[in-house]
Amino acid sequence: MSVVSLGGAVNGLNQKFEPEGVGVLTEASSVKCTLQGADRLPEFLQDGDFVIGGVFSIHYQHYTLIHNYTTKPEPPKCTRSINARSLRFSRAMVFAIEEINNSTELLPGIKLGYRIYDSCVSVPVSVHIAFQLSNGQDPVFYKGSNCSQSEVVMAVVGDSSSTPSISISHIIGSFNIPLVSYFATCACLSDKQQFPTFFRTIPSDHFQADALAKLVKYFGWTWIGIVHSDSDYGNNGMVSFLEAAMKEGICVEYIESFFRTDSRSKIQKVAGVIHRSTALVVVAFTAIGEMKVLLEELAQDPPPPRQWIGSEAWVTDSNLMSFSFCAGAIGVAIQQSVIPGFRDFLLDLSLSEVAASPLLTEFWEDAFNCSLTKTAYSDKRECDGTEDIKTLKSPYTETSQLRITNMAYKAVYAIANAMQNAVCNKTNATMQCNKHIRLEPKQVLNKLKKVNFSKNGYHVSFDANGDPVAFYELVNWQKSEIGVIELVTVGHFDASLPEGEQFHINGNLTWLDGHTQVPVSVCSKSCSQGTRKVLQTGKPICCYDCIPCPEGEISNITDSPDCFPCPKEFWPNPKKDACFPKHVEFLSFNEGLSIILAAFSVSGACLTIITAVIFFCHRTTPVVRANNSELSFLLLFSLILCFLCSLTFIGAPSEWSCMLRHTAFGITFVLCISCVLGKTVVVLMAFNATLPGSNAIKWFGPLQQRMTVVFLTLIQVIICTLWLVLSPPFPMKNLTTYKEKVILECALGSAVGFCAVLGYIGLLAVFCFVLAVLARKLPDNFNEAKMITFSMLIFCAVWISFIPAYISSPGKFTVAVEIFAILASSFGLMLCIFAPKCFIILFQKEKNTKKYVMNKK
């Protein structure tokens, strides 16, 4: 591979670019690899026909150097902070390549080599490594040699973090060298415009964020806190999570970002926010390094119980499970897998092999607390060969749940399959590979886009963005009987399934403090049915007050944002969570009030009939004859009708009853008043007839009396007929007087018709009253005008008071008022006109004589 255009590829300029540790020649004719400055040695290396690079964060810290700009700075170096889990990842790459080299099916006859570097989770270190991988093999081992085919890496596996992976991909991508990451999950890396050569075997954080949001919503948590790494992984992942959380209606109390190299005060601030928060659930979208720093700080003063929700970066790390206050944590994890023979490979470490590798030496000394090289300053014992790695309890030897390890393993196989498709041909069922072919990284890049295979039962392929199909396991930190936290798989999330079927839980979970009940983390408790949510000013939408629904409205779901009114003829129940048909109200016959009114009505009619019988039995007596017996009997008949017509007002209104009740009332009362008016006129005419020379009685004899009654009643009949023809009364449902019930009543139809009926009755009553007043002092011993005056006075008083009472009475009481007015006026006429006469007829017979009646005072 020619390296003459390194500067132009990276900077876009045809100028000399000499990064530290990389020799670049500007002349096309000179293709010598020369080293300028110190080189970074690989942790593991092996020669081969084709070489694969590897970048792993085996150490999680590096020395922070302060440059004085007087001497040439040394390359960044890692501190003694080995991560045994990441060491296992790098060893998985070695194991996969050895497995491929021993295979007769994959790349037969071709030996793969590798160069595996440690990035220390550091961008400067990653950049330095990227330039070395782009520039070919380390010139320190091949000083003065040409940049031959064997010196070019065909692809790179790594890195574990997103930020270093971004830097590496930007650099090696300029040379079309593919980068296949096993643990970089930032959704930003799916952008093929910026990272055209990036692939990964682990799902993008876009899917992880969606899974975490659905997980939070599944358990009903709407009030959460968030902590995340101040890195590309944490920042981009949190943006994706917040978008997904917003769609699920989840509110966030606080968002805190930090990095493991931040000051102690910054970490303490984040811990203090968690301590003081009201959110019970904490979503941690952090890398292992940040999570370890945060939990160490929280362990100084453990916070109140918190339900931790973890991203796949840290939730499966066995080292973090030592923090007991995190028991019950739940999160998404990469699917666990089995790699046959891998555990034996990890444990196959001899003391001589360890001593030959500085990295393995550091691991061995830390694991067994001994020293392979005895120094005067070391207080550790000397390793004597009795150390047994098979008994070691370490993340390095923990292979019961291989997750990220399998991602690194699959990344190597993906590259190997792409290389096979580029250099091998299948003829006669035999795979023939040419190891002498000049293979370019770009060819591997093109073939990587199309890989599609399965290994150990796990499928490997990439979509257009270089991402695999997203599948996560849901894991739970559960305390065992001996008090040790164990990782238990309780479900899964499959992004390939339709919406609504992606999420599944199939196990029993334990929560914070070992509880089996799902904890509650809400800003406000759910609003029950019958109430609605009202947002609290200045707070997120999950913080609200529950306000009872207003009158006439209901809410039949919890946390309803609004109440809605019931249909017209329905009304809410007391809880205001359902609509029921309104109570229908009318003056029914089985009500107490109706029974009383009906009793008075029947009693009045019976009393009138009794009076008529008395009059009929004594029709020849002076008292009966002196009071115009024909009009008296007609009056008694009309009073019977008046009493009985009040019964038509009781019961459910119908079309016929509405027309009958008002017209019967109007006609019978006019008939009644016409009779009273006739009797009044007769009294006046009778007095005038006793005067000498007067013959007035001739003009108002029995025929004229009948004609007067018929004429006056006919006028009311005509008024009622016009009312019924033009706009008759009709039954209606009154929904306005009472909101909570329906009143069945008779609408007047035409208010003018109703007023005309009442007005005509009132006109006759007033006229009759005036005539009775004029005749009240006539000198007869038995003057009926006085009794008519009292009866008309009562009648007018009743109906004058009826008008405001009728208008103001609600519901069925309107009908009751009308019945009362009919009965009161009927009883007034009955008692005032006929009661004194019946008393004389029955108990004062000495006054029932012609002499007494004709006697004048």
Image (cartoon, rainbow, N blue to C red):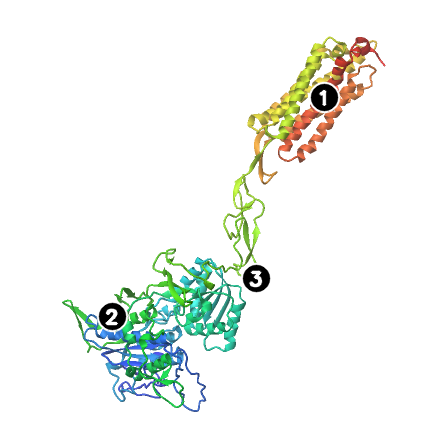
C-alpha separation, residue under disc 2 versus residue under disc 3: 57 Å
Of 2 and 320, nearer the camera is: 320
- Would residue 226 appear left or right of 107 to someone viewing this image? right
Tell me the quadrant of the picture where the C terminus can be found. Answer: top right
| Residue position marked by numbered label 2 in the rendering | 417
Task: State the residue lying farthest toward the right.
Answer: 857
- x, y percentage for residue 110? 20, 76
| Residue position marked by numbered label 3 in the rendering | 538
Q: Amino acid at mark 3?
A: Gly
Within 10 angstroms of label 1, few (less than 14), some, or many (20 or more) residues? Answer: many
- Would residue 565 appear left or right of 497 to someone viewing this image? right
**Dots 1, 2 in contact, CB < 8 A:** no
Q: Amino acid at mark 2?
A: Asn
| Residue position marked by numbered label 1 in the rendering | 829
* Disc 2 secondary structure class: helix
Of 746 and 342, nearer the camera is: 342
Q: Quadrant of residue 447?
A: bottom left
Q: Quadrant of residue 345?
A: bottom left
Q: Can I make out residue 764 in this image?
A: no
C-alpha separation, residue under disc 1 versus residue under disc 2: 117 Å
* Disc 1 secondary structure class: helix
Tell me the quadrant of the picture where the N terminus can be found. Answer: bottom left
Q: Is residue 193 above or below residue 144?
A: above
**Dots 2, 3 in contact, CB < 8 A:** no
